[in-house]
Amino acid sequence: FRLSMMDLIKDGSDWKEIQLLAQAIEDAGATIINTGIGWHEARIPTIATLVPRGAFSFVTAKLRGSVGVPLCTTNRINGPRVAEDILEAEQADLVSMARPFLADPELLTKSKQGRADEINTCIGCNQACLDHTFLGKTASCLVNPRAGHELEFAPPTQVTQEETRKKIAVVGAGPAGLACATTAASLGHDVTLYDNASEIGGQFNMAKRVPGKEEFYETLRYFGVELKKRGVKVRLNHPISKATMRDNEERFDAWILATGVHPRTPPIPGIGHPKVLSYIDVLKHKVPVGERVAIIGAGGIGFDVAEYLLHHNDDEDESESKSNQHRIDEFFQQWGVDQQNDIRGGLKPNHQSANNDSSTNNNNNNNNNRRIHLLQRKKGKLGAGLGKTTGWIHRATLAQSGRVEMIGNVSYEKVDENGNLHVKNGNTTRVLEVDNIILCAGQESNRDLLEHNNGSSSGSGAAAAAAAAVGNVHTIGGAYKAGELDAKRAIDMGTRLAYKLTDPDNYSMKAPTSDEEIVLRLMAKWMK
């Protein structure tokens, strides 16, 4: 029986009522009681990435001794080590996991065999599981696009035959390139992975530095292990040129361009001022940022940069050093959760609802006094394109700080000689006096290597000869389509391309549309 042991809503159950309910459930014949955390109406994150691992296991532990049946704890338990820690601490008799088995259905087998480093860890993003469910799409997984599509990804029967084995070059070790390289190698192909950088990961190396997204370290750990296990030849600090592709001295049968994106620079007068930075300058190169900041662009990257700047000092980077218990304490303090679960509903009385547009919480744990203007051209609420089940969390986190002003429907007039940003909002012109302006205004595909190397032998002369020499050239991930940085699409494309290269006739580059999705689309069209 699933019992809500912490409602996380105003006037929810108190602890005595929870105990009475649990005892009544036991008397009624239940043999196991599972822990429910939060109602759907609750405005406290309970399963998203920013929730620390095993954060709510203390709730289950408190009920132990009140009933005689085994108690199962849940929420953000994404690996065997987390589960073992909870069981060893005697906080629960059992643990339950769901999303981690989408990420890696072999989780238990790998753990039992001492191969925990090979586990593809659930990062708690919800993007392909819960978000898909609420859109009528097949539930899957960002880090494992085979989930929910197992029959579609059945291994090709001819993969082990030598005549079908291809020699493949993957250029770019970001999410798309890593997925393609490891999948192609697992299917029996000879794969070489190239990247300009000194480490694998691409844009993931920036995402992992954003507070609440530390789970990306696990994804990179998994891919690193897979590269070694599958025998992929990794060539870091190794740029590839058009000439390299044209000469093709290693006789590759196919070139996969997973070269990612470049930040887009909007055409604003004065945009070349030294105070203007890109999100790559901030997240990758760690360029110092002042206390007054304007962020141009309020998509996923803009929100990530704002979150990063709220919690980051230029002389330190705490994201890797905090213990899980430290993260749990900070999380409960920020969201007003009673860690003793004594207060009715589990919420502190002075906690301000995340539904509010502003907050006096002003969570500030690192002497960081930044004030941020987060700007977008579009009308309507900022971050409207964020995840269906997690977008509200990102908006609430920034609002709770009391240090982020969100402004929509703006036009950017200019950056003046002092580096201040002039914007127009309706009929009002404002001058934002800032220390830095950070560009998060979208991306452009990096297709430099694609020019004249499109894999087609059509045409004549040198261009046709070069194309024929190169062979098949494919683009995936951001190099195929920039848009918002979309790891879900990138990993899915990389995985699907590896299968399609193996058996072009039986594999598709796009997941089939589910019946539920078709019905929801028709209903939405009809309701308009």
Image: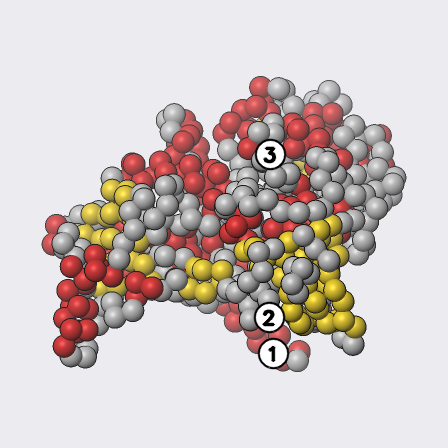
Question: In this rendering, is residue 444 above or below 331?
Answer: below
Task: Write the residue at 45% across / 60% down.
Answer: 262
Question: In this rendering, is residue 449 above or below 293?
Answer: below
Question: The residue under label 2 is which amino acid type?
Answer: Pro
Question: The residue under label 1 is which amino acid type?
Answer: Lys
- Direction from residue 278 to residue 503 in the image, left or right: left
Circle nearer the viewer, 2 or 3: 2
Q: Are marks 2 and 3 in contact (CB under 8 Å)?
A: no
Question: The residue under label 3 is which amino acid type?
Answer: Glu
Q: CA distance from mark 3 to mark 1?
A: 51 Å
The residue identified by callout 1 is 525
Question: Which residue is nearer to you in this view: 25 or 94?
Answer: 94
Q: Which mark is residue 316?
A: 3
Task: Write the residue at 73% across / 26% down.
Answer: 63
Q: Position of residue 497 (x, y in %)?
A: 32, 59
Question: In this rendering, is residue 393 above or below 220?
Answer: below
Q: Quadrant of residue 28?
A: top right
Circle nearer the viewer, 3 or 1: 3
Residue extending farthest to the left is: 163
- Direction from residue 73 to residue 122 in the image, left or right: left
Q: Position of residue 299 (x, y in %)?
A: 60, 60
Q: CA distance from mark 1 to mark 2?
A: 41 Å
Q: Tell which circle, 2 or 3, labels the residue nearer the N-terminal end.
A: 2
The residue identified by callout 2 is 269
Q: Which mark is residue 18?
A: none
Q: Position of residue 198 (x, y in %)?
A: 36, 41
